[in-house]
Amino acid sequence: MDEKKNVVQEVMDGLTNWARVNSPWVLHFNSGSCNGCDIEILATLTPRYDLERLGVRLEASPRHADVLLCTGAVTRQARERLIRIYEQMHEPKFVVAIGSCALSGGVFRGCYNVMNGIEEVIPVDAYIPGCPPRPEAIIDGVVKLLNSLSPANHQITVADRNDKPSTEKAVEE
Amino acid sequence: MSTLSALFAISIFPGGLFLLSSGLLYEWGNRKLLALLQNRVGPRWFQPLADTIKLLAKEEVIPTGTNKFLFIGLPMVALAGGLTAALYVPLAGLAPSASFDGDLIMVFYLLSLLTLCMGLAGTNTVSRFSLIGATRTLTQVFSYEAPFLLALLGVAAAAGSWQISNITAYSGQHWLILTQPLGFLVALIGLMGKLEMPPFDAPEAHTEIVAGALTEYSGRGLAFFHLGKAIELVIGLTLIAAFFLGGLSNPLWFLIKTLALLFIMVVLQALLARLRIDQTVGLWWRYGVLLVLVQWLLMVLL
Ligand code: SF4
């Protein structure tokens, strides 16, 4: 009985994992970037790269989204909004920091009005460097994040992320 | 024995499993064709399924300020309405599994249930985007519903019956698209309005009001609403194909005719830009109703 339940559980887990990997709905938030990275994100979503073939859909409501694409060095004013949007998203949720500013503050590092990167405010799951990163790099980063979900690889759990807000960099170029 | 066949009808064919899977496949067809017209690759064939499973497995949060009972119940009612309506339409070209005199009216109401539930779900939350979306949804219901109803009733009048199985038997011998082209046009565009496809997607305009009435929904509720819409697409296509395109004599014809209709709808979606909500209302009450009334007049005169 116990074993049978485990098999069912495994199948269900596999199914949900498959669905999650194949249907990431993204939300785009600008926490004070120069707009360069945002334009690259929009370019990524255009027909030229056609992310719908990977199941990516741009959602406008945090409640619908699975992945938060976040750019910018997080200004002190954007900080509260960023936290609020992050908390409005439903589990399981992932954060991708896009651009040098989002990683470390970039050219704005050390300014009196910025937090020096997203990971200072909310836990980040993948980092995509570049100023700004090319659309290919953004796609690569999101795909790497999604691949890390499959059980063969390291599974990012909620507890994990709460333990160490800054996981190791998923993308390094 | 009859309990068994009823169970089969509800859970496998034509309700339940068959309907859900065909709904997901038609939704994929819709998205894929649209993508091809926009010079894109488009989603993979299992995309709607993956979306649905993912949503079902997502955390569900009930926002503050909502009525919990309604928040959880409305998506279920919406989906149940669609599933029930399927029992009365000639899905896959086979005879409907249940039928009584006047079931056409009931199917109309069951199909509107989804939209009404979405409107209620929007007004149930305190989010202003949901409220605007809900207002637009309900406004749109009142604009397209009357012309749509009149267009389909034109067929019922021609067949002299309010029972779907009688109407399909009549329309099997007559291609009503030839005798009632205006009614066909209004019915097809009415279906697009019902499904909130572009150009009638003002209620869920992503670029203006986040996601309309469903802004606060996630997880299971959103999945149910999505499924309900996919089902409504199949049922609507079936109804229009059966009424106007010479009936559905077998599954092959069903497939060909519904896909042809779907293709027309996709081309319209790709061609037209979103209408403002007042333009939508104007379109339906100025031109939609007029067209149907002209159709009725012709029917009476000829
Ligand atoms: S990383 Fe470069 S392009 Fe992106 S927001 Fe910072 S300065 Fe702008």
Image (spheres, rainbow, N blue to C red):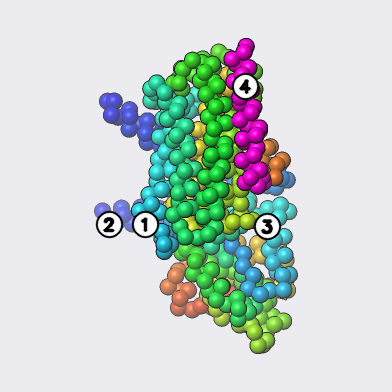
Secondary structure under tag 1 reads: helix
Against B112, residue A121 (above or below) is below
- Please report the bounds of the magenta region as a residue range: B274-302
Hey, which quadrant is residue A31 in on the image?
A: bottom right
Ligand 1 located in image quadrant: bottom right
Residue holding disc 4: B295
Residue holding disc 3: A45
Return the residue nearer the eye: B231 or B289. B289
From the image, state whether disc 2 or disc 3 is nearer to you.
3
From the image, state whether disc 2 or disc 1 is nearer to you.
1
Residue holding disc 1: B68
Residue holding disc 2: A2
Label 2 within 8 A of ligand 1 by Cβ: no
Q: Residues within 10 Å of mark 1 (few under 14, many from 20)?
A: few
Secondary structure under tag 4 reads: helix
Q: Are marks 1 and 4 on the same chain?
A: yes
Chain containing the residue with disc 4: B
Hey, which quadrant is residue A99 in on the image?
A: bottom right
Q: In the rendered structure, which amino acid carries the disc numbered 4?
A: Gln
Q: Earlier in the sequence, mark 1 or mark 4?
A: 1
Q: Is residue B282 magenta?
A: yes
Residue B154 seen in this snapshot: yes
